[in-house]
Image (spheres, rainbow, N blue to C red):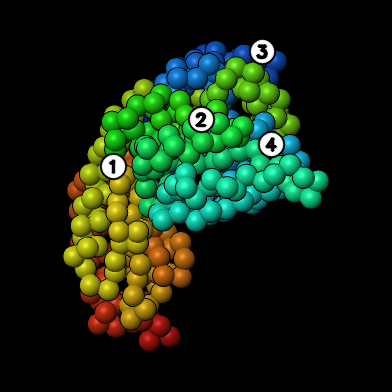
Amino acid sequence: MNVIDLRSDTVTKPTASMRAAIAACEVGDDVIDVDPTCDRLERRTAELLGKEAAIFMPSGTMTNQVAVRIHCKPGDEFICEAGCHIYNYEQGAFAQLSGVVARTVEGPAGVLSASQLKGLIRPFNDHLVRTKLVCLENTHNRGAGKVQPYDHVEEICTWAHESGLRTHLDGARLFNAVAATGISAEQWSRHFDTVSVCFSKGLGAPVGSALAGPKEMIQEARRHRKLFGGGMRQCGIIAAGALYALEHHRARLVEDHANAQLLAEAIRQTEGISLSPKDVDTNIIIFAVEPALGSSAQFAAELKQQGVLSLPISGTQVRLVTHLDVTEALCRQAAKIIKQVAGELAKGNTSTRELEAAY
Ligand SMILES: *Cc1c(COP(=O)(O)O)cnc(C)c1O
C-alpha cells in the first residue's frame, strides 16, 4: 500500500537533484573559519530576508532560543502568543538555558493584535521582571498555518520598537506566508530585529534553520550557537540541501496550499469532523473529531489502517500537513479515505473494532 504521510512537512526526503547538489558541494571547517557552502547559504538567506547577516543552525528550536538569548538577559521577559512554538514545543528552553520568562497572550488561531499587548510592558521596579521582547510566529503552526494579518504585524512591531522592545519572528514557515500573500520575505522581515526560517519544513531540506538580523546581533548569535552545541564543522553537506531548497522549492509552496484546500473541502463535506480553526490559509489543516466518532487517536489509527498518516494534536484534534512529497493525486486519495473513515466510525463499523472483537 502507498503510504500518504501527512503528519508534518518535515517528513520530506531530499530529491535526486538535491542529493546531487549535496554530493557536489565544497566544504570547509565552519568553526575554525568558514564553510564556503554554508557561507553562501547564509548570505543568500540574509539577502532574501533583507538583513545584514544570517547564521545557519541545526534546528528552528536553536535559532529561536539563540534569538531569545541575544535579546534577553536572566530576569527578563518576552511576550508571545499562548499557542506558539517557542512557548509550547521547545521545553521552555528560554527558562532552562537563559533564565528568561514568557508572558503569553491568547490570540484566535494564533493571531495577536496590538491592542492586546499595549499595557503589558512592566514598569521598572525591583519586584518585576523586565519586558524586553515580542515574539510572533508566521505562519502559526497551532493556528493551522494561519498567516498573521500584515497590518497586525506592522502595528505590533511599531508599538514594540517605539516602546523600546526588540522583536523576533519565528518564521519557520515564513515562505508559506510569502507564497500565500505575495508579500515578500523582505517585507515581512523588515518589522523584526531577528527572523528565524526553517529549511526542513515545506522547503524540503533534510536539516537546518537560519537566524537573520543585524551584523552585531548575528555575531553575538554565533557565540551562543557554539555555547548551545551548534557549531558545525563541514556543515556545507547539510547547507547545500538547504540552499538547493531555498532556490528551487519556494515557488512550489502554492501547490501545497492548493492541496491543503482539497483536504479542507473534503472535511467541510464530511459529517462528524470539522475544521478547527475554520480557515486553511496555507499547508496545515486541523480538524476536530466529534465524540460520537471516537477520539482523535482512534481517528488517526483508522486513517493509518487505510494508509494515511496524520498527527493527533489533542484529544479531539487531528493535524494534516501537505508538502513536497505528496502530490495532488495522493491528496485526493487521502481526502477520499478521510470521508470513508468518518463514515465507518459513525456506523461503529471499523477495522480497529473488528480487530478488538477478534481477540
Ligand atoms: C518546526 C518549528 C520550529 C522548529 O522546529 P525544529 O524541529 O527545532 O527545527 C519552530 N517554530 C515553528 C513554528 C515550527 O513549526
In the picture of the structure, the residue carrying the numbered disc 3 is 33
Residue type marked 1:
Asp
How many other residues sit within 10 Å of disc 2, few (<14), some (14-19) or many (≥20)? many
Residue type marked 4:
Cys
Residue at x-position 51% and y-position 30%: 192
Residue at x-position 42% and y-position 59%: 311
Cα distance, mark 1 to mark 3? 38 Å
Residue at x-position 41% and y-position 70%: 316
Q: Position of residue 24 (x, y in %)?
A: 45, 17
Cα distance, mark 2 to mark 1? 27 Å
Of pointers 4 and 2, the one earlier in the residue sequence: 4
Of pointers 2 and 1, the one earlier in the residue sequence: 2
SS assignment at label 1: helix
Q: Is residue 290 above or below residue 141?
A: below
Q: Is residue 20 found left or right of 31 in the rendered image? A: left
In the picture of the structure, the residue carrying the numbered disc 1 is 256
Q: Tell whether label 2 touches label 3 (CB within 8 Å).
A: no
Decide if residue 196 is in sight here.
no
Cα distance, mark 1 to mark 4? 36 Å
Q: Is residue 331 found left or right of 166 in the rendered image? A: left
Of pointers 1 and 3, the one earlier in the residue sequence: 3
Name the mark on residue 192: 2
Cα distance, mark 4 to mark 2? 15 Å
Cα distance, mark 4 to mark 3? 28 Å
Q: Is residue 349 above or below residue 187?
A: below
Cα distance, mark 3 to mark 2? 29 Å
Name the mark on residue 72: 4
